[in-house]
């Protein structure tokens, strides 16, 4: 187990209060957080209710004995802990490498606080080293692909090992695009959301409140 990921996850666990409704992210560091949270909840008899961002996360949390409910069963989410594929100095990020970006964003946007757990390799001066996932409905997907290609965003369908298109938990496809040459990311985010057929994208602008960096022990708070 990666010590840096464990440290970041433990830092996040230390910020979780009793009687909290906690959003559970996806990815390797988030999985470690779920394990450590479950241990703390059991040892300290904490009253924790969880909302998962993917089917895999839900099964993992249930396996550790955490109480997991549907997002519509709660009227608030106190804090969500998740990983990130890439983060810039303003704590904007790219997420969705695990194909859970739609559910991750729904949970994040309904959370009072969002904590991201990473190591320093995920921090970059600007976003774009990591491909940006775009979740697209199956019907007419090639038209969306062609539009993204015309915009010189170098689209690539996300595929499984068997060569078939990857399908998300909500039954959609993912197209990964190259945003390394895009300077105005808020504008791109709005343009993608306005594109018919696009369900969601992996740009998380002004979402992260606290970035926990495992290998340096830093807790970085979003300005403003």
Image (cartoon, grey):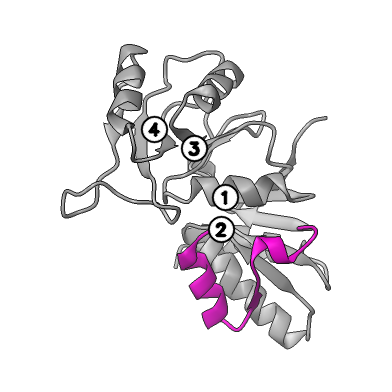
Is 60 magenta? The answer is yes
Q: Which residue is mark 1?
A: 104
Mark 4 lies on residue: 131
Closer to us: mark 2 or mark 4? 2
Q: Where's residue 87, x and y in %? A: 56, 36
Q: Position of residue 201 (x, y in %)?
A: 50, 35
Q: CA distance from mark 2 to mark 3?
A: 16 Å
Secondary structure beneath disc 4?
A: loop
Kindly report which numbered mark, 4 or 1, lies closer to the viewer in this rendering.
1
Mark 2 vs mark 1: which is more N-terminal? 2
Q: At 78% across and 84% down in the image, what residue appears?
A: 44
Q: CA distance from mark 4 to mark 1?
A: 17 Å
For label 4, count other residues whose C-alpha is less than 10 Å away and answer few (under 14), some (14-19) or many (20+).
many
Q: Which residues are magenta?
A: 54-77
In the rendered structure, which disc, 3 or 4, sits on the residue that comes first in sequence?
4
C-alpha gap between disc 3 and disc 1: 13 Å
In the rendered structure, which disc, 4 or 1, sits on the residue that comes first in sequence?
Answer: 1
Question: How far apart in space, not on screen, are marks 2 and 1 (Cα)?
Answer: 5 Å
Residues at discs 2 and 1 in contact (Cβ within 8 Å):
yes
Quadrant location of the N terminus? bottom left
Judging by the rendered image, the residue that carries numbered circle 3 is 199
Residue 142, position in %: x, y? 28, 29
Q: Determine the residue located farthest toward the left in the rendered image.
A: 162
Q: Residue at x 72, y 80 (%)?
A: 41
Determine whether label 2 and label 4 are within 8 Å by CB.
Answer: no
* Residue bearing mark 2: 53
Q: Name the mark on residue 83.
A: none
């Amino acid at each position: 187990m990666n010590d840096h990921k464990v440290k970041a996850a433990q830092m996040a666990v230390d910020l979780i209060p009793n009687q909290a409704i906690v959003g559970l992210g996806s990815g390797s560091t988030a999985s470690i957080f779920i394990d450590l949270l479950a241990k703390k909840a059991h040892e300290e008899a904490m009253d924790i209710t969880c909302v998962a961002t993917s089917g895999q996360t839900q099964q993992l949390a249930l396996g550790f004995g955490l109480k997991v409910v549907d997002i519509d069963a709660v009227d608030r989410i106190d804090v969500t802990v998740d990983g990130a594929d890439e983060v810039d100095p303003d704590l904007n990020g790219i997420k969705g490498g695990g194909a859970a970006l739609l559910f991750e964003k729904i949970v994040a946007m309904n959370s009072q606080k969002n904590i991201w757990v990473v190591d320093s390799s995920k921090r970059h001066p600007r976003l774009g080293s990591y491909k940006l996932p775009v979740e697209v409905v199956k019907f007419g997907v090639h038209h969306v692909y062609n539009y993204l290609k015309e915009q010189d965003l170098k689209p690539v369908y996300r595929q499984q090992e068997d060569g078939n298109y990857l399908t998300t938990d909500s039954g959609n496809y993912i197209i990964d695009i190259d945003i390394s040459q895009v300077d105005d990311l808020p504008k791109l985010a709005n343009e993608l959301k306005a594109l018919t057929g696009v369900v969601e994208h992996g740009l998380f602008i002004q979402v992260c409140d606290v970035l926990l960096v495992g290998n340096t022990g830093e807790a970085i708070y979003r300005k403003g």
